[in-house]
Every structure is written in structure tokens, then in C-alpha cells.
Image: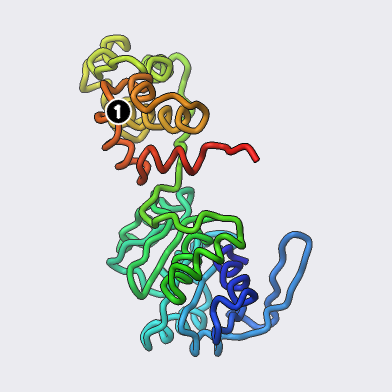
Amino acid sequence: MSFAFGVFDIAASYGALPGVAVRVVAGEPGTTIVGGGLTCEVPYDLGAVRDADLILVPNLPQCSAEDPPEPALEALRAAHARGARVAGLCSGTFVLAAAGLLEGRPATTHWAVAGRLAQMYPGVRVDASALYIDDGDVLTAGGGAAGIDVGLHLVRAMAGAAAANRLARAMVVAPHRPGGQAQYIQTPLPDADADDPVAETIAWARTRLDTALPVSLLAERAHMSRRSYDRRFREITGTAPAKWLTHQRIIRAQHLLEATTLPVEEIARSCGFTSAAALRPHFRRLVGVTMTDYRTTFTPRLS
């Protein structure tokens, strides 16, 4: 069951969406929902999809190479064609892609399966970093709590900001996180041979992010030409050295914003930037929010 469905279920119980009926639909007879030690039969069939104004496709147990059942895809296509809005949540985005509803459009999903989505459906413009994307009649969202975000976004569109804010307060969640905000991915460093000179420079650089680290210096430390170093660096990390360094500096800035009360100017210098003004555009571009908003969201508060 998706987090977004929970938003609408709670909204209905609070009377925030008068006249709106929330229904759980299965594409095949005899389907049950299993989770948390509980089993629940699904009460509605695809007829409810064909009559719905808004359809939420939840997370799938796994992203299979096989398409979902054709009757379910056809029901989605028919509902969308007559004007229903359709949202794919986490790996539910794969269902929308299989139905052809994302061709040539921007879409997101959980960052861990975004590469598979792009590979299976090359016509989809996959953005692995966004929490959710509202492309008008079609919406997609990343994993977990992003379902709550897109649910509140939809409630806001249907019932207004005040109703969505009251609902968020009742759920004890943030009333609004913009869809363009990043999923706060911390990219792990792939395993590499400890004897690899480039891998050694990567480990060395991560302990010196507060200093200037020109790529030429890293190549010199590895006793390699700049061209050979760049090529091997991409093989290990999947990206260029300068881009990787900036990303690592931003990850360090995120940690310092969460775990310390250091002024932003001091954080910038600790991450190898000359000033907060130099750090801000990189942080906003990679994380999707300002440093102030990030710190407000992630700083623990004493009760």
C-alpha cells in the first residue's frame, strides 16, 4: 500500500475531501494486499479505474522485465484518455511507462531503480533526483515518503493549501516539500582494488575536501597522465573527477548542516569553497533546496 493512498485515506476520515471516495483496486481477481503481518482482500476491480478521476499506481514488489497485465494497462490508458490524472509512485512509475503514458515526458522513481527505468523505457526523460514530478495529467514520485509529498500536493490542488496544511499537521509531516527537491541520495563509492593508484587518490581526496584539489594534482599523485587518470576515474566512479569532487563537497556540507551549528561561511570553507556565496549555487543545483531550508528540515529539535 502506498504512502500517498494513506494521505487520501486520512483526508477522507478528516473530511478534508468531501464527496471523494477512496477505493483500492486490483487488476486481477482474488488479489490480496499483504504487509506487516496483515492480509487484506482488494474490494474493487478495474471498473473503478475506468470511472476514476485520479489513479494512484503504488509501489510494485519488484520491477519485472515483463509488462503488467494488459487489462490493467488498457484501463489506465482509457482513464487517462478521458481526462483522469494518473500518478505512479516509486516503482509504480514502471506501470505508467508500460502503458505508454510517459513517452517523451519527464518522470521520476526511486533513485535505486531509475537506471533500470531509463534502460527499459528510453523514451522516458528520467530524473532520478526529484521527489516527484507533476507534468499535469501525469505525476510520478520517488520512493517512501515522496508518496506523502505527492499526496499532499494533490490534496492541495483539490482542496486548497489550508486543507493540505491542516492534514499535514494532523499527520505530523512537513506541509510542503517541492517536487524539485532532491531525494537526498548519498552515492556510495564503488569498491575498487586497494592497489589501484586512482582508487588511492579518491580515498586521499575524501580526507582533504577542505583544501584545493585540482585534478592535475590527483593525476600527479597517481603518476598518470591527466587523460589516463580521467579515463580510469570514470571507470571507478562513473563520473568526471571535478564533478565527483563537487558532489563529495556537497555531501560534506549536508552532513555539517545536519550535525553542527557552524555558520554557513565556516561550512563553506570546511568543504573547500572560498565562501558561502561560492557554495550556495552548487548546493542548490545538486540538492534542490537552499542550505537554510535543508538545515531547517534535517536539524534535530529538542522537545
Closer-to-camera residue (67/160): 160
- Residue 124 picture quarter: bottom left
- Residue 254 picture quarter: top left
- Left or right of residue 259: residue 244: left
Query: What is the quadrant of the C terminus in the image?
Result: top right
User: Would you call the spot at circle 1 few (<14 residues within 10 Å), some (14-19), or many (20 or more)?
Assistant: some
Residue 193 position (above or below residue 178): above
Image location (x, y in percent) of residue 104: 27, 66
Residue 113 position (above or below residue 240): below
Q: Amino acid at mark 1?
A: Ala
> Mark 1 — residue?
276
Residue 230 position (above or below residue 90): above
- Left or right of residue 206: residue 165: right
Tag 1, which secondary structure?
helix
Closer-to-camera residue (65/303): 303
Image location (x, y in percent) of residue 286: 34, 41
Closer-to-camera residue (240/119): 240
Farthest residue to the right: give it. Answer: 37
Residue 152 position (above or below residue 221): below
Residue sitting at 50 percent across and 67 percent down? 164
Query: What is the quadrant of the N terminus in the image?
Result: bottom right
Residue sitting at 32 percent across and 41 percent down? 284
Image location (x, y in percent) of residue 272: 32, 20
